[in-house]
Amino acid sequence: MLGLLGSSLVNAQIAGGAQYVSEAAIQDGFALFSKGQVAPIVASKQDYSGVDRAIHNLQIDLSKVTQANADIVYDQIPKGKKSIVLIGTLGKHPLIDQLVKNKKLNLSYLPGKWETFSIQTINKPFSNIDKALVIVGSDKRGTIFGAYDVCAQIGVSPWNWWADVPVKTKSGLYIKPGVYSQGEPKVKYRGIFINDEAPALSGWTKEKFGGFNHQFYEKVFELILRLKGNFLWPAMWGNAFYDDDPLNAPLADEYGVVISTSHHEPLMRAHDEWRRHGKGQWNYATNDSTLREFWREGIKRMGKNESVVTLAMRGDGDAPMAQGTAIELLERIVKDQRQIIAETTGKPIEQTPQVWALYKEVQDYYDKGMRVPDDVTLLLCDDNWGNIRKLPKLDAKPRTGGYGIYYHFDYVGGPRNYKWLNTNPLPRIHEQMSLAYTYGARQIWVVNVGDIKPMEFPISFFLDLAWDPTRIKSNQIDQYSEQWATQQFGSTYAKDIATLLATYAKYNARRKPELLSPETYSLLHYREAETVVKDYNALLIQAEKINTSLPPQYRDAFFQLVLHPIQACANLNELYYSVALNRLYAKQGRSATNNLAEKARALYQRDSEISDYYNKTLANGKWSHMMDQTHIGYTYWQQPAQNKIPDLSSYEAPTAAKMGVAVEGNALARTDASDPLVLPTFYAQTPEIGHYLDVYNQGKTPFTYQISTTTNCLQIESQQGKIETEQRIEIRVDWSKAPRGFSRFPLLIKASTGQEINVYVDVQNNLSPELSNFKGFIESDGYVSMLAEHYTRAVESPELKWQNLPDIGLQAGGMTSSPNTAGIKTPGHGSPCLEYSFYSGKIGEIKVNALFSPTLEFNESNGLRYGISIDDGPIQSINLHQDKSNQAWERSVANNIRSLFSTHVLNQAGAHTLKYWVIDPGVVLQKIIIDLGGVKQTYLGPPESPYRE
């Protein structure tokens, strides 16, 4: 199409990008709204009723933006007007067809295209009309998408109703000259699955609509189409799309939304319909005739509604089939189902779109040889945690039914439900779905979105990506986020809002909120827990600052889309941190123990208040129940019936004062001089890093303290003071005064209680002169920690390059080989690798911990492999999936990381080079930790080591 129209065709980006509407007048532009008048809309009665709905929504949106009315007329040129908007489907709008016939409108690229639209301005279309804006579709949805593209371009967000995004009025609307189109979508069916919808969405729909009826689904259908999707798996937890409201299905067909049923609901029958109407067991081996009639009724009821029919079956209630289920039985089920479809529709079976979902154990049947006819779409699946399990082989014979992907933003199941808030960073969605597209999964993309809210941002991205996965590159995701933020809130704060959106999703993906506990992050090492809380609270401060700066009408939308998840998760992380401190303090006998318990209770109460505001106050109660989802108090995979605060400890403080001292890195505290404490070692390689000790009171009566030392190289934040409950004292080294080599300095802490406690400070000031000419990472504190994207050198080949995937990791970006379709590589002899230079004084055995995104062996291999070597040592080939146990998988998805170890030998102290080699494609390296004997146990691992340029 680009070749047909040349430079006149502009790609209209969904979330910003090529803007063809201007508020200011444009030379040779089309005046859609000028001098208080909106150009009239000319539609056709011959067109689809779904198109007419979209046209009326365009009319409404124009009224919101302009505060003026746009007239709609049918099949005639309005009198007394010099400019008109022609909108309709090719072959369904006589006036548009007349312009094509008279060669006044070039639409040669539209016939036969799927869901393609053209938006263009033309001069003198009719004798009495000076200009026309023509919005035309190749088919029904093509026209609908064209109408909604204009809606978005004039300033009405697809989330106007669903997230209360306000509409900014404009003084003028002018269409730039040219031809605008997004071309044909690259993925045929693009949609969402409303699932796991209790208690939030179910409570909301019951209160606002009376249930999952056509009034509710009208809002869903419109949202899907405004986002240029076309496909829906309806809600199915105790719900049945066809059975709950007879208007649901015909309304979907009228709107233009393709209805299917989820992976375990065959032949257009919802699972709950079997509970309501089924007779006997859900077992084809013993109850086949009853099931056939049940399914036949589903196809009869479907009628001519545009649908994709799900085949095969799982066990009752989305459970696995009975153990040992024969492939022959499943093949017979599919054969019988296809016969029912053909007989009932009266059409050749190939003319009814069908899908077989290879979900969970169903994939095992496929792997063991079960096959379905070529016209059936094979719906491949992720592992419910965003990691695709299987993709077609690159040399696989093409299927007429093609391949699809069933993906998850929400899940109920092990190792833990995640349903509350968005935990889906765009870079990971992009990496996995782009992989799927490259390997040929292009027929259906459907994503489990839970309650729809609060997944607004990733839903937009998923459907935008599905339209054309090649359009958004991995290094353009931040631009996409900024465009999306601009669409919702305007450009003033868009860049900052985009950063907030990306950062909170990354923080939540480190460990999903439902999996958090007081033990998640380390209290003792690398200040991990306090840094996590500090970072989240800093994000909250930024979000609140923007919130107060935005015009008031934007604040409901900002709360839903940005502020709420940050506010709620900052609070939750601080809650668990406070509980962890409370428990530690109780063991150490701190008088502040009960204060921490009170703080935790206040934070727990704050969690309820945040949810209550969302449910009861936000948008005048419009979203009541939408934050009913429990998320605190899990004891196993399933959600608790109600939130429950973690167990707290208490401490009965005596009246008399008593000093206690605790140091960073040690859970044990001291109250006397019997066993000195030792602070973590200070290293000249990291001169900016300090360490702390806590002086605290075990009693209720205050006391004073004084710290003395024998050296002048220690900088002690507070050498004396009064302690009521506790005081943290930061200690640093003045390296200009520190002696060379290793030194141990004593600190003597005296209290007015008469107590004396000794603390030792170890200082390692041994920077080698060799470092002056060294470029790379430097050992400190017994490790070298390196983020993957901070390599020293990248070795590439003509056919294989290295690609940085920005922000895909738990802490930063990740590195992968490109293209991801490359075959297996043999490492060594100049093959592609990443080199990491590091300096260490260690001689002997070391461990290398490589951390990866939790990608699965999607290519039907025995596992994805990488190679690793140090200096001229042997290359070790390591399999990411060598441990295929369920426990290993659960650990990898819960931690959102795959952690692999290898053992190597350093033959001498000094400069070294670690080489990371490509073997299999699709592997995403996030971080490398070289353990030289000092790595402490934490969730995120040690912070990155210093790098010398």
Image (cartoon, rainbow, N blue to C red):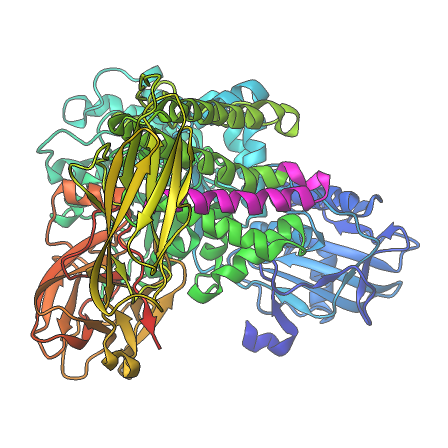
The residue closer to the viewer here, 278 or 846, is: 846
Whether 199 is drawn above or below 833: the answer is above
Determine the image quadrant of residue 829.
bottom left
Q: Which residue is drawn at 30% across and 58% down?
A: 711
* Image location of residue 403, percent across then percent down: 32, 54
145 on left or right of 424: right
The residue closer to the viewer here, 664 or 206, is: 664
Determine the image quadrant of residue 110.
bottom right
Stretch of the chain drawn in magenta: 527-556
Tell me if I can see residue 593 in this picture.
yes
Q: Which secondary structure dominates the residues rendered in magenta?
A: helix
* Image location of residue 152, percent across then percent down: 65, 52
Check the picture and name the quadrant holding the C terminus: bottom left
Whether 895 is drawn above or below 518: the answer is below
The residue closer to the viewer here, 920 or 206, is: 920
The tally of labels here is 0
Whether 324 is drawn above or below 100: the answer is above
Q: Which residue is drawn at 18% across and 27% down?
A: 284
* Image location of residue 139, percent across then percent down: 57, 54
13 on left or right of 408: right
Tell me if I can see residue 15 in this picture.
no
The residue closer to the viewer here, 636 or 258, is: 636
Determine the image quadrant of residue 701.
top left
